[in-house]
Image (cartoon, rainbow, N blue to C red):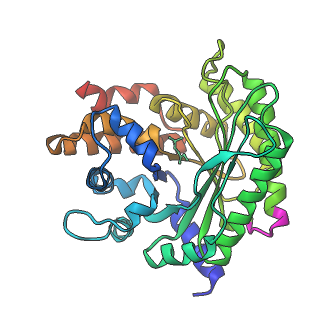
């Protein structure tokens, strides 16, 4: 298969009505933080158990078309010995891989950060592909204040995202381009909108310069929301209106799908906000999810590291996936939350 056909086939498998992506690619320190909340030690075996539990949830493929894995998981197997990426593929869930090497302070720009991991990326992608990965993810983060992010951080991260995306496409791997405007802080909804617009504009300008084929990539942005500690929080209708306004100004119609991150929103908020956007009527792109915490949190709390809770935990994951699938189609209502098995457990 030619590289172009390969990318097209992966896009078709990923972009499906009513389906989104499960982000299960937490770094070592992040998964340790998540496990700590349920009193579970972050060992290689516990990480394998947890990620196997999620991926063996019966029928997950009905709502989820792709999973983003950590490099470690790519080499792990479920209990019967089937490698996790192969298992996912058998469920109709395309395996992907987080390929950035995390963020560091951006030299010369106090308070800003830059994502690293470009050196040797092409060779790493070839190896990940042999293990079954068909798409990749790279996350850039932008801290928000009255002065942050600096124009330098906006430009440097856009450049890195575009170089990553171009390298991925050259290797036949679909890139997920993830610019995350952080929710931390007390900034207003309007300030988040302003920063998101500048960030997305720079990202698409860089993608164009680097000759990235927009039809063969996914955008994974943050929604336009006020800072977590801002006194005025926003309704789903406000988040939807502002997010769509900014996306329409900055994201070319050639991009097939926008799969949001949840970024610290509660599971219910992330679902309601996605639903509100899809209720605004057809957009040039599909609007879906690529949630980590907003999909995993209730399932993690139900599991608590106990094999006896595995089935309840899987039910909680399936329930969130089902609700987000409804939100992809503008068919979610808050009343559907009452049937959430995780809340029944609480
Ligand atoms: P959250 O949905 O928890 O923000 O995770 C998505 C992700 O992949 C962050 O890089």
* Foreground residue among 126 and 275: 126
Q: Is residue 211 magenta?
A: yes
Which quarter shows the C terminus?
A: top left
Which secondary structure class fits the magenta region best? loop
Residue at the location (32% across, 46% down)?
A: 42
- In the rendered image, residue 301, in percent from the top left (x then y), is placed at 30, 33
Vertical position of residue 199 compared to residue 13: above or below: above
Point out residue 144 in the picture as x, y percentages from the top left corner: 72, 31
Is residue 36 toward the left or the right of residue 234 in the image? left
Q: Quadrant of the N terminus?
A: bottom right
**Residue at far top of view:** 231
Residue 345: quadrant of the picture: top left
Q: Is residue 271 visible?
A: yes
User: Is 12 left, or right, of 315 in this rendering?
Assistant: right
Please tell me whether residue 8 is drawn above or below residue 67 in the rendered image.
below
| Residue farthest toward the left in the current orientation of the protein | 308
Q: Residue furthest bottom?
A: 1
Residue 208 placement, left or right of 325 = right
The quadrant holding residue 71 is bottom left
Instruction: Judge whether 100 appears above or below 300 on screen.
Output: below
Residue 345, compared with residue 177, is above or below; it is above
Q: Which image quadrant is residue 86 in?
A: bottom left
Q: Nearer the viewer, residue 28 or 236?
A: 28
Magenta residues (range): 208-213
Q: Residue at x 74, y 61 (%)?
A: 162
How many discs mark residues in the rendered view? 0
Residue drawn 45% across the image and 58% down it? 70
Residue at x-position 72% and y-position 38%: 244
The residue closer to the viewer here, 341 or 116, is 116
Q: Is residue 178 magenta?
A: no
Q: In the image, residue 261 lies at what x, y percent?
A: 57, 43
Query: Would you say residue 19 is visible in this rendering?
Result: no
């Amino acid at each position: 298969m030619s590289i172009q056909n390969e990318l097209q086939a992966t896009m078709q498998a990923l972009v499906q009505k009513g389906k989104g992506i499960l982000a299960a690619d937490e770094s070592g320190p992040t998964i340790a933080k998540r496990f700590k909340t349920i009193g579970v030690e972050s060992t290689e075996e516990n990480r394998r158990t947890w990620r196997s539990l999620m991926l063996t949830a019966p029928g997950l493929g009905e709502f989820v078309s792709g999973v983003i894995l950590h490099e470690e998981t790519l080499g792990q197997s479920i209990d019967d010995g089937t490698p996790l990426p192969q298992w996912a593929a058998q469920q109709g869930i395309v395996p992907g891989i987080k390929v950035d090497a995390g963020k560091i302070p951006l030299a010369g720009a106090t308070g800003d950060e830059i994502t690293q991991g470009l050196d040797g990326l092409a060779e790493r992608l070839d190896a990940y592909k042999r293990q079954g990965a068909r798409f990749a993810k790279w996350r850039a983060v932008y801290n928000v204040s009255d002065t942050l992010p600096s124009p330098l951080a906006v430009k440097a991260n856009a450049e890195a995202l575009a170089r990553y995306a171009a390298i991925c496409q050259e290797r036949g791997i679909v890139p997920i381009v993830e610019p995350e405007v952080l929710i931390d802080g007390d900034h207003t909804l309007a300030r988040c909108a302003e920063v998101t617009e500048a960030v997305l504009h720079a990202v698409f300008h860089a993608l164009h310069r680097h000759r990235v084929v927009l039809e063969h990539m996914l955008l994974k942005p943050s929604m336009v929301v006020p800072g977590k500690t801002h006194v005025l929080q926003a309704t789903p209708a406000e988040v939807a209106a502002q997010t769509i306004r900014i996306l329409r100004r900055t994201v070319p119609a050639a991009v097939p799908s926008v799969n949001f991150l949840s970024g610290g929103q509660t599971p219910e908020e992330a679902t309601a906000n996605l639903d509100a956007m899809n209720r605004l009527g057809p957009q040039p792109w599909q609007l879906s999810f690529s949630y980590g915490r907003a999909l995993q949190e209730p399932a993690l709390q139900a599991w608590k590291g106990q094999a006896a809770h595995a089935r309840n935990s899987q039910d909680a994951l399936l329930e969130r996936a089902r609700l987000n699938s409804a939100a992809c189609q503008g068919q979610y209502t808050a009343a559907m939350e009452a049937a959430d098995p995780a809340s029944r457990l609480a």
